[in-house]
């Protein structure tokens, strides 16, 4: 038994001295396209709006409660968390890959060979019996020496995959936060457009009544009444259309938060929600650490690089150490007779793959190509992220200009409606001028509400594109 212990120690010592021969290369971050500053930003600032928690970004308490509910109950997010739990289990198992396997086995065997067989004759000659029994209890240990770093590379790959799942959860959460905010602000826009349409319907109705009275007085003809009626109908049809869109948006918003379709309470009006001023996007390089999908893409490169080490290690000799000890006896009566029934085994084997029909080399070449593919996808994801941030910055800047022009246009057209109705009453303008002024004013107010909502959308998209929403 002492000699067995010495053999195991010698094999373990050999493993320690050879464990530095790692064939896989350590991970190095590939070069990625990252400008000094985002397009649309005047100066690059280390501070970023993405550093804020989403509760600091949205002042409306209702949208905050909806986001809270979505983070707890959104099914896409719950599925992502479930995947994370699976990856965590695999990571815990991977941490133990370098430890030996230990098994315990108890077996009993009874054999009755033919009397005329060689075994039967031998048993009669040596054991003076017609059968043979054997009872064994053994604890066996097996250990693969990680000479080439193959097992360490496998651990690195599993850890990277776990971290990738963790980043995927954060990416889903950022999208859920953005989708809920988009949906809520779209609901406020539809409310505002419905209010505008109802106000314009009242104007159209009063103008229709006035036109009918003027027809009765012989001032205008039937065509003027019909045109006024048509204008009222065009405005009327907007109301059920907007109510339909409101219902659909409420249902979609409830489903995002993990609830059954229902109405959604609103605590603010669209014109009361102000976009955040002086938004800073930070420096593009910060996307590598802040944006979850970019980080997940880089971790995919880490995992692919580790798998290259595993594939290359499989091409080199493998040292396996086995040892075992236990009790063995031909008779059950003296099975536990110690030390007579004690036995032990120890072995070390080196296996060098010679011909595997090119499988190992192909696995290695494929692993390298998959690593190159992961690098390309990582670079692409960085490029997409920079593009999304730049798009949002351009939208924020240009929508400010559009809002200024749209507000002035609404004010101008409201005055035009008042003046056209007065001139029409004085027979100094025809009914077509009044209808045109009312139609233009309606479209301008609806457009202003849309621009306001797009400003909020651009702010949300910038926040999401920078990686905000998971903190």
Image: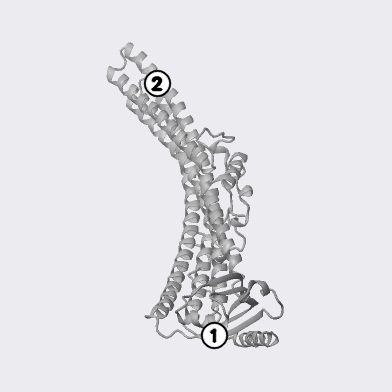
Q: Position of residue 442 (x, y in %)?
A: 42, 32
Q: Position of residue 176 (x, y in %)?
A: 53, 49
Of residues 32 and 298, the one drawn nearer to the viewer in this rendering:
298
Residue drawn at point x = 47 percent, y = 77 percent: 115
Q: Residue furthest top?
A: 216
| Residue 100, quarter of the rendered image | bottom right
Residue at numbered disc 2 = 207
- Disc 2 residue crowd, few under 14, some 14–19, many 20+, Cα 10 Å: many
Residue 21 lies, with reference to residue 88, above or below; the image says below
| Residue 108, quarter of the rendered image | bottom right
Q: Nearer the viewer, mark 1 or mark 2?
A: 1
Provide the secondary structure element on which disc 1 rests: strand
Q: Position of residue 179 (x, y in %)?
A: 51, 47
Asked whether residue 375 is in view, the answer is: yes
Left or right side of 222 for 87: right
Provide the secondary structure element on which disc 2 rests: helix
Q: Position of residue 232 (x, y in %)?
A: 37, 24
Residue 82 lies, with reference to residue 249, above or below; the image says below
Residue at numbered disc 1 = 349
Marks 1 and 2 sit apart, C-alpha to C-alpha, by 99 Å
Quadrant of the drawing holding the N terminus: bottom right
Quadrant of the drawing holding the C terminus: bottom right
First reached walking from the N terminus: tag 1 or tag 2: 2
Residue drawn at point x = 58 percent, y = 65 percent: 91
Of residues 45 and 157, the one drawn nearer to the viewer in this rendering:
157
- Disc 1 residue crowd, few under 14, some 14–19, many 20+, Cα 10 Å: few
Of residues 102 and 466, the one drawn nearer to the viewer in this rendering:
102
Residue drawn at point x = 63 percent, y = 47 percent: 55
Left or right side of 218 for 64: right
Q: Which mark is residue 385?
A: none
Residue 138 lies, with reference to residue 54, above or below; the image says below
Residue 161 lies, with reference to residue 435, above or below; the image says below
């Amino acid at each position: 038994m002492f000699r067995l212990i010495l053999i195991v120690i010698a094999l373990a010592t050999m493993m320690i001295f050879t464990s530095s021969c790692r064939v896989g290369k350590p991970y190095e971050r590939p070069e990625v396209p990252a400008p000094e500053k985002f397009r649309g930003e005047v100066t690059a600032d280390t501070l970023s709006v993405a550093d804020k928690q989403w509760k600091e970004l949205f002042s409306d308490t209702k949208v905050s409660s909806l986001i809270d509910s979505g983070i707890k109950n959104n099914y896409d997010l719950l599925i992502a968390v479930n995947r994370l739990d699976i990856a965590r289990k695999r990571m815990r198992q991977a941490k133990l890959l370098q430890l030996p396997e230990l098994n315990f086995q108890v077996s009993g065997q009874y054999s009755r060979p033919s009397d005329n067989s060689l075994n039967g004759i031998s048993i009669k000659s040596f054991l003076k019996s017609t059968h043979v029994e054997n009872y064994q209890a053994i604890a066996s240990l097996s250990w693969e020496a990680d000479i080439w770093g193959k097992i360490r590379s496998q651990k690195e790959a599993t850890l990277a995959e776990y971290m990738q799942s963790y980043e995927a959860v954060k990416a889903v959460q950022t999208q859920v936060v953005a989708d809920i905010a988009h949906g809520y602000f779209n609901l406020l826009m539809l409310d505002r457009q419905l209010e505008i349409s109802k106000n314009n319907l009242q104007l159209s109705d009063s103008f229709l009544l006035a036109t009918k009275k003027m027809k009765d007085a012989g001032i205008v003809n039937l065509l003027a009444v019909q045109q006024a009626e048509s204008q009222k109908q065009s405005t009327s049809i907007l109301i059920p259309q907007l109510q339909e869109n409101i219902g659909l948006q409420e249902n979609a918003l409830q489903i995002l938060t993990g609830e059954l379709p229902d109405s959604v309470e609103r605590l603010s009006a669209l014109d009361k929600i102000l976009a955040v001023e002086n938004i800073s996007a930070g420096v593009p390089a910060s996307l590598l650490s802040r944006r979850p999908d970019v980080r997940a893409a880089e971790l995919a490169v880490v995992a692919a690089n580790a798998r290259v080490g595993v594939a290359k290690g499989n091409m080199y000799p493998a040292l396996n150490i086995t040892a075992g000890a236990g009790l063995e006896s031909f008779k059950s009566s003296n099975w536990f007779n110690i030390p007579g029934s004690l036995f032990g085994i120890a072995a070390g084997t080196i296996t060098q793959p010679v011909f595997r029909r090119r499988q190992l080399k192909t696995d290695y070449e494929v692993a390298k190509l998959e690593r190159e593919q992961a690098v390309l996808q990582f670079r692409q994801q960085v490029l997409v992220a920079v593009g999304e941030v730049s798009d949002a910055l351009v939208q924020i800047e240009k929508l400010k200009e559009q809002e200024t022009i749209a507000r002035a246009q609404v004010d101008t057209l409201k005055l035009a409606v008042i003046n056209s109705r007065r001139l029409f009453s004085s027979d100094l303008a025809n009914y077509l001028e009044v209808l045109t002024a009312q139609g233009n004013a309606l479209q301008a107010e609806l457009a202003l509400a849309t621009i306001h909502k797009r400003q909020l959308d651009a702010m949300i998209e910038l926040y999401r594109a920078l990686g905000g929403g998971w903190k």
